[in-house]
Amino acid sequence: MSNDGWLIVGLGNPGAKYEATRHNVGQMVADVLADRVGGRFGSHRANARVAEGRTAPGGPKLIVAKPNSFMNTSGGPVSGLAQYFGIPPERIVVIHDELDLPFDSIKLKIGGGHGGHNGLRDIAKALGTPEFLRVRVGIGRPPGRQDPADYVLRPFASSERDAVAVLIEDAADAVELLVERGLLDAQQRYHGRAAQ
């Protein structure tokens, strides 16, 4: 594997039941990225669907993946793909939903804690380090006293759908900027954006 490869992982849960839920926003972004690089998802022995392509001719190679496992057991597929493709943790980008960010916001970082996100916890355990990149897609907190676990497994509200479509495209843009220009440039572009 050449050293220009990036493993881009969109987190979510498998199956039609979960496709449009807040918890699957990472996989929604992965779908956009695969389309942009001209890749088609195919099965991989690491228990994931994988699409490969470049952001532009001569641009970075993206290995876009959607684990077939449930969110809380994402570590095995991510670790397996990293080993198979020879991708070090600092070139792994995990796209995931983030309750602690306002809806329609994007933040990027490397490393840190999992903040109660079991998918991130499992990936850090499987990789043996939390030092991978994260694109955090804000889904906001549940209204009233709704259980966060129920909230993330519900589809976006009809009033949010137009904004969600833009948010997913923006998150895909953030991933491309991250791999092409680096974390700092991507943070400067997306951290200043106010949630609408």
Image (cartoon, rainbow, N blue to C red):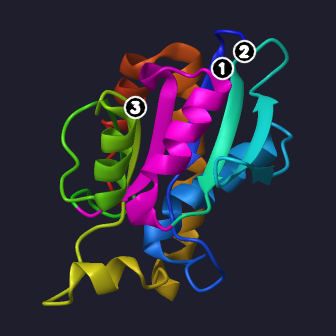
Q: Secondary structure at mark 3?
A: strand
Can residue 161 be seen from the camera position used here?
Answer: yes
Of pointers 1 and 3, the one earlier in the residue sequence:
1
Q: Secondary structure at mark 2?
A: loop
The residue indicated by pointer 1 is: 5
Q: CA distance from mark 2 to mark 1?
A: 7 Å
Q: Residue at x 53, y 15 (%)?
A: 181
Task: Give how far across and how far down residue 139 sits, in percent.
Answer: 35, 66
Q: Which residue, as the protein is rendered here, is positioned at the far left? A: 145
Is 166 in front, or is 93? 93
Q: Report the mark closest to the observer, 2 or 3.
A: 2
Task: Give how far across and how far down residue 138 sits, in percent.
Answer: 35, 58
Q: Residue at x 54, y 35 (%)?
A: 175
Task: Give how far across and how far down residue 176 sits, in percent.
Answer: 60, 30
| Rendered-image quadrant of the C terminus | bottom left
Q: Is residue 82 magenta-colored?
A: yes
Residues rendered magenta in the picture: 70-99
The residue indicated by pointer 3 is: 133
Q: Residue at x 31, y 42 (%)?
A: 125
Is 119 in front, or is 30? 119
The residue indicated by pointer 2 is: 1
Q: Tell me if label 2 and label 1 are in contact, CB under 8 Å.
A: yes
